[in-house]
Amino acid sequence: MATPADKLAQSLAALKTLQDAGVVAIRTTHLTRVHRERLLKNGFIREVMKGWYIPARPDGPAGESTDWYASFWSFCGAYLSERFGEDWCLAAEHSIALHTGNWTVPRQLLVRATKGGNKPTGLLHNTSIFDVRLDLPDAGDTEIIDGLRVMRLPAALIACGPGHFQARPVEMRAALAMLSDASDVLSRLLAGGHSSVAGRLAGAFRNIGRGQIADAILETMRAAGYVVGETDPFADRPPVPIGQRETSPAVNRLRMSWAVMREHVLAGFPKAPGLPADKGAYLHQVEDVYATDAYNSLSIEGYRVSAELIERVRSGDWNPDNARDREHQDALAARGYWQAFQKVQASVGRILEGNNGGDVAREDHGGWYRELFGPSVAAGIVRPADLAGYRNGPVYIRHSMHVPPRREAVRELMPALFDLLRDETEPGVRVVLGHFFFVNVHPYLDGNGRMGRFLMNAMLASGGYPWTVILLAQRTRYMTALESASVEQDIRPFVDLLAELVERR
């Protein structure tokens, strides 16, 4: 007779079959009633709406949002395809976001559908889909990105409302910069007789420094008999020049966001004291703060560490061959933190000698990461290949609506980030934006928070600021500030938090 454990195992096998097939949006018909009820009772699936479920982690706390945010886009693509077949696509604004690599989960996903109901469909965690009954673009003006039907970029730029240029200027400028000539938009402007849109796009292209495209739009439309007046839909000029050859939207978004956020950092972060005259005394202070730093940084990540464990690791009373330490994740994390801390301290020494902080971080951060997870490799928990470089797959941040960029974009973004750190003249900007954008990109599968705080302190040293600990007591405020910067592009709460902590030291 099958035991309850045997029965659950059978249901889990059925769920695994679906997941191996890439199914994220689980319909009632995908599982038998017995399997479905058993998995739901044990927390392995979660109901999104009547008849629709997603896989879930049974050990997640009540109200956990990570499973939903990680499933959002795949679920919406499957749900909309089941409901509307091929007769739907994302609205222009959401299409543009995905084209530029912005996969942040929206509160409300706008969808065009020929049989749309003109009403919202409620989803988990105060998100929803609003399907608007509208005609679809021509067949050639849509494409599929990861199961989502979107407008092709030229069509989306034409359909996008004028207010979106001012509401999302970084994203819109990055999208415009992806087009290398006027032909793609011109054919659609002429076919639709879009004279006012043509004037708006001409002004937008001229705003980002693409005057040739702007002139081509105006001259061609006028030659076809249309009266076109150029208007700039943006409220300001680009914060940085947009290169004629740089077509990566992810890198363009990073550079423009850095420039916009930089002004808020300069307004709210204390002035740098300058490199200390006594390098040895500074490094001694860094050594003194290690225990406090390790406890708080590891605790923020959910590890349970004690002063006794930290001291035992520091003194060498730790052995990966010992069963107690080999099997204890907290001990492995503490040992890795100690080893990485030594590497970061050596990098700080190089910075104090006058080396460029951005260059030092570029050269050394891989070593910090290898040390951080070295003990886990020794214990056989982490594969050596996982320490070879940046991540090769997707990663999600607990409780966050921000979805880190795809692996391909990470390899473009990290060199660009270190270029910005190298070229930045204000140490305070390196501190705040270095930390923020590192965790925003999330280049590793694990350890990004600890690495971001290491980078923050290396950049603090570049300005002579003291090593600063983000306290466990500040965790909620810290994570909320990072979320605000990632989702709302508002860096000010993060600036305020770091400024307060630095001034206390």
Image: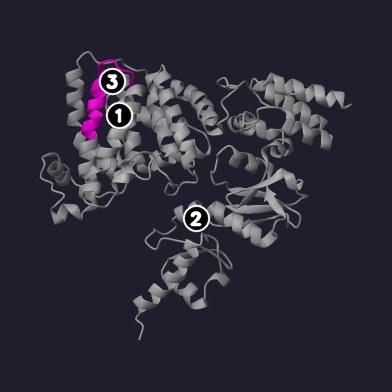
- Spatial distance from mark 2 to mark 3, Cα to Cα? 42 Å
- Spatial distance from mark 3 to mark 1, Cα to Cα? 11 Å
Q: Residues within 10 Å of mark 1 (few under 14, many from 20)?
A: some
**The C terminus lies in quadrant:** top left
**The N terminus lies in quadrant:** bottom left
Disc number placed over residue 503 in the picture, else none: none
Q: In the depicted view, which residue is nearer to us: 248 or 6? A: 248
Residue at 69% in and 59% down: 85
- Spatial distance from mark 2 to mark 1, Cα to Cα? 36 Å
* First-in-chain label (2 vs 3): 2
Disc number placed over residue 351 in the picture, else none: 3
Q: Residues within 10 Å of mark 3 (few under 14, many from 20)?
A: many
The residue identified by callout 1 is 364
The quadrant where residue 472 appears? top left
Q: Residues within 10 Å of mark 2 (few under 14, many from 20)?
A: many
The residue furthest right is 225
- The secondary element bearing badge 3 is classed as helix
| Circles 2 and 1 in contact, beta carbons < 8 Å | no
Question: What is the magenta range?
Answer: 341-357
* 381 drawn magenta: no
* First-in-chain label (3 vs 1): 3
Disc number placed over residue 68 in the picture, else none: 2
- The secondary element bearing badge 1 is classed as helix
Residue type of the residue flagged with mark 1: Asp
Residue 442 position in % (x across, y down):
41, 40
Classified by dominant secondary structure, the portion drawn in magenta counts as helix
